[in-house]
Image: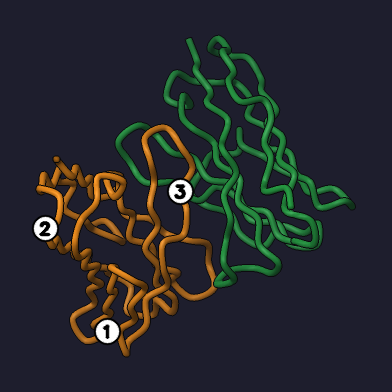
């Protein structure tokens, strides 16, 4: 079983739509959680950290459910520029970042 | 301020050869981590260095080695290259070790023929 599992997609949505991604993680000792965004053939860039209380950054909302070991990302009012691969990332203990395989989002005009 | 820099950007090698990849962290950052990203997968952790000491190692063979220099830059070395080593190699820097925020460089794209 992979440490971090994501639906690979692609999610094809029209501009203005709301889209949600989930990911699950296997290590209950994981301490920190993130969403990274990766454009085609570019490096990953931190989108936002994820906290148990939930956090929001503009059109992006992230949630963590420790009991069920899943993390979610909600994108409202999708823009063409949101098209990318979204990587779910956890840190089991103080080890390095553990990435999921990513979920591809394609926002269409 | 300059971000994480990596060199070279692209590299083509043949099986059995050796390769050295270089990374310069963001100024003031003391930790460097290396990741391998195969097409269609998320990055996989290879090494982490902090203050010139190895602080973590992923599940990679001994053909992979790394070091960090006094100026905090780092090298990743891969010996006896295999076709399966073809990937994007990413370097990430942070002020301290994980879970401190890591910032990624643009990567080195290695092709092994």
Determine the image quadrant of residue B38: top left
The spot of residue B63 in percent (x, y) is 61, 33
Label 1: element kind: loop
Q: Which colour is chain B painted? A: green
* Label whose residue precedes the other's in the sequence (2 or 1): 2
Label 3: element kind: strand
The spot of residue A101 in percent (x, y) is 29, 48
Which chain can be seen in orange? A
Residue in the picture at 37% in, 76% down: A50
Q: Nearer the viewer, residue A2 or B5?
A: B5
**Which numbered marker is on residue A66?**
1
Residue in the picture at 52% in, 26% down: B109
Q: CA distance from mark 3 to mark 2?
A: 24 Å
Q: Chain of mark 3?
A: A
Q: Is residue A97 above or below residue B70?
A: below
Q: CA distance from mark 3 to mark 1?
A: 24 Å
Q: Nearer the viewer, residue A17 or A100?
A: A17
* Label whose residue precedes the other's in the sequence (3 or 1): 3
Instruction: Have a look at marks 2 and 1 and say if they share a chain.
Output: yes
Q: Label 2: which residue?
A: A17
**Which numbered marker is on residue A44?**
3
Q: Do tag 3 and tag 1 residues touch (Cβ < 8 Å)? A: no
Q: In the image, which is nearer the foreground, mark 2 or mark 1?
A: 2
């Amino acid at each position: 079983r992979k440490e971090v599992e994501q639906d690979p997609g692609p999610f094809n949505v029209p501009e203005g739509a709301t889209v949600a991604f989930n990911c699950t993680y296997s290590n209950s000792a994981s301490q920190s959680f993130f969403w990274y965004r990766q454009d085609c053939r570019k490096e990953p860039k931190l989108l936002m950290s994820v906290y148990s209380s939930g956090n929001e950054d503009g059109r992006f909302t992230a949630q963590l459910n420790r009991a069920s070991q899943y993390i979610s990302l909600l994108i409202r009012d999708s823009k063409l520029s949101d098209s990318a691969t979204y990587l779910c990332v956890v840190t089991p203990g103080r080890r390095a970042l553990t990435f999921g395989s990513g979920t591809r989002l394609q926002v269409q005009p | 301020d300059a971000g994480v820099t990596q060199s070279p950007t692209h590299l083509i090698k043949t099986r059995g050869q050796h390769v050295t990849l270089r990374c310069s962290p963001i100024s003031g950052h003391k930790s460097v981590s290396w990741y391998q990203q195969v097409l269609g997968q998320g990055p996989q952790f290879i090494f982490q260095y902090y203050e010139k000491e190895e602080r973590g190692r992923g599940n990679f063979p001994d053909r992979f080695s790394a070091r960090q220099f006094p100026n905090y830059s780092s090298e990743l070395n891969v010996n006896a290259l295999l076709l399966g080593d073809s990937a994007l190699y990413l370097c990430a820097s942070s002020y301290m070790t994980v879970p401190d925020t890591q910032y990624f460089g643009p990567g080195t794209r290695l092709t092994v023929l």
